[in-house]
Image: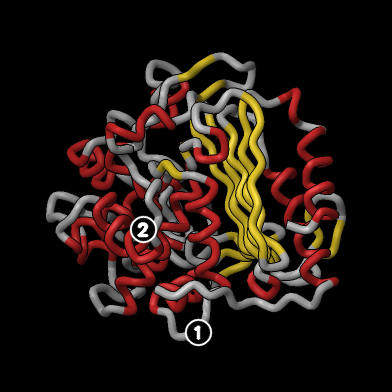
Amino acid sequence: MRDDLRAQVGAVLAKVRARRVGLVVGVHADGETAYWHRGLLPNGPDTIFEIGSITKTFTATVLADMARDRVVALDDPVQRHLPSSMRVPVRGRVVTLEDLASHRSGLPRLPKGLLLAGLTRDRRDPYAKVDEARLAAAVVATRPRREPGRRVAYSNYGMGLLGHALAFRAGATYEELVRTRICEPLGLADTWVEIPEPERWRIATGHTWRRGRTPPWNMAALVGAGGLRSTAQDLLVFLGLHTAAPGSSLAAAAAETARARAAWRRVEIGLGWLIVSPGRRLPRRRLRPRLLLHKGGTGGFRSFAGVIPERDVRVVVLANQARSVGRIGLRLLDLGSDLAFAHGATARSDLVT
């Protein structure tokens, strides 16, 4: 990677080194890719992290890919792809798969009762008890807050239900579905729900904000909302779908996820992705090109993934500590964007799927 960008990225990371237990950064800009790592990590830049809600972008991509194959349709009622024991309440109209993927389902952020338990007795692993039976009971007990499609309200519950529905429709586990439709075509060797035994030594240990060790999370039946583990390298390849050559099946599915469905706060929402329109100001009051981004967090991890499709700039930041990495990610996107713009970079990688 160019020496000037490498030096600038190093300067950003030098400011956060002392405050982080462990950190891995991957940057793709100006046609080149590089990685940095700091702190307590079992396998340097190839360490495996819980990626939390970045999982939602995988779930949405699976949905778009299944829709392209006509296995499902975006406007299908979610009820069509759930077992009969899960009767989704209706308020105004039925909840569709697209509603779930764009956080417009009207469902609450969490299933009934999970917030209190997650703050008290189950706080170290708040989702682990939400198996299929408990999810079915939660669905029946849910009272939608509003009619679907009315407004965006971020929902781990809704995205987890989407992952469950897609897996049920495919007759597979969620992990099998992601591995078959995304990981195997892209060659993502280190993206799993359950890491294979020979590779488990590479999983980072999570830490709280105060640097205390904390156990891994098990998202159980809501795995589609935040249950994947991955590496910076795998995530940079996944982000490359948004700059891939036309005609690629998965790239076309990714493009569908990046289409804005509704406005939300200072951004727009696609399928899974948060979308920053050109010229928007985010932290540092800087005008930005079009961005796709998502952050993630579990009990002991924080993550950031962002891509500027038109300039083929991609950034991944993974930390094994519960301290936000969002601002670091935005700064690195700015650096990569400036360099790509200066050199007239255009999107389109050689990724073929």
Mark 2 lies on residue? 183
Residue 339 place in picture, x, y as percent: 81, 64
Structural crowding at the residue carrying mark 2, measured as other residues with C-alpha within 10 Å and reported as few (<14), some (14–19) or many (≥20): many
Image height of 162 relative to 310, above or below: above
Q: Position of residue 213 (x, y in %)?
A: 51, 16
Q: Secondary structure at mark 2?
A: helix
- Which amino acid type is shown beneath numbered disc 1? Pro
Nearest the eye: 52 or 233:
233
Number of dots carrying numbers:
2
What amino acid is found at the position of numbered circle 2 in the picture? Cys
Q: Position of residue 321 (x, y in %)?
A: 59, 27
**Which image quarter: residue 83?**
bottom left
Residue at the spot x=50%, y=27% of the render? 42
Work out how far the residue at label 2 is from the one at label 1, CA to CA, in angstroms: 19 Å
The quadrant the C terminus occupies is bottom left
Residue in view at x 75 percent, y 23 percent: 18
289 with respect to 127 (left or right): right
> Is residue 150 toward the left or the right of residue 111 in the image?
right
Residue of label 1:
246
Which of marks 1 and 2 precedes in the sequence?
2
